[in-house]
Image (spheres, helix red, strand yellow):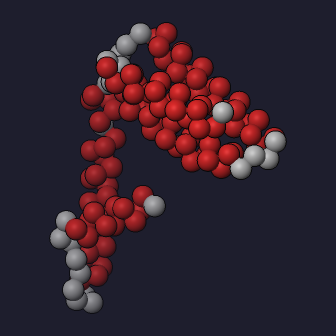
């Protein structure tokens, strides 16, 4: 899915190949564009990080542990909500990442998302 989005963004940026001979050149520019984009995104977490209180991170990790226990129980009882929980688990990961890279006001984003997930799965 990520590869499709990257290819679409690259295509919209104007890197279209029109001739057969330019396909290899276009692929090379696409690969170099992906590598440069990856390097730019890789340094974002380090550059934008702010440290906060460690206790709040512990609370979030405990919440993630509870979600994992809930997923295990849903799987054990063969509930169809298990698959919904797996989809939301991806969202929990990204919400945790975005909330705790900058631990200022951004941590307020994680717990409402967590509570809504528990409301859906519980």
Q: Residue at x 26, y 75 (%)?
A: 26
The vertical placement of 39 against 44, above or below, is: below
Residue 109 position within the rendered picture, expressed as x and y whole percent measured from the top left: 39, 27
Q: Nearer the viewer, residue 17 or 28?
A: 17
The vertical placement of 30 against 89, above or below, is: below
Q: Residue at x 31, y 20 (%)?
A: 105
The answer to whether residue 32 of the structure is visible from this angle is no
Residue 104 position within the rendered picture, expressed as x and y whole percent measured from the top left: 31, 18
> In the image as oriented, which residue stretches furthest toward the bottom?
20
Q: Residue at x 27, y 53 (%)?
A: 36
Query: In the shown orientation, is residue 90 left or right of residue 21?
Result: right
Residue 72 position within the rendered picture, expressed as x and y whole percent measured from the top left: 74, 36
The answer to whether residue 46 of the structure is visible from this angle is yes
> In the image as oriented, which residue stretches furthest toward the left?
14
Q: Nearer the viewer, residue 92 or 16?
A: 92
Q: Residue at x 22, y 89 (%)?
A: 19
Query: In the shown orientation, is residue 46 left or right of residue 113?
Result: left
Residue 12 position within the rendered picture, expressed as x and y whole percent measured from the top left: 22, 68
Q: Nearer the viewer, residue 75 or 22?
A: 75
């Amino acid at each position: 899915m990520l590869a499709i989005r990257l290819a679409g963004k690259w295509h919209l940026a104007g890197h279209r190949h029109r001739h057969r001979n330019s396909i290899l050149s276009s692929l090379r520019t696409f690969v170099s564009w992906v590598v440069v984009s990856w390097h730019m995104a890789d340094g974002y977490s380090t550059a934008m990080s702010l440290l906060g209180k460690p206790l709040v991170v512990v609370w979030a990790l405990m919440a993630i542990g509870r979600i994992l226990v809930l997923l295990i129980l849903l799987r054990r009882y063969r509930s169809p909500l298990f698959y919904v929980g797996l989809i939301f688990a991806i969202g929990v990961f990204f919400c945790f990442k975005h909330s705790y890279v900058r631990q200022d006001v951004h941590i307020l984003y994680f717990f409402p998302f967590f509570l809504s997930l528990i409301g859906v799965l519980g």
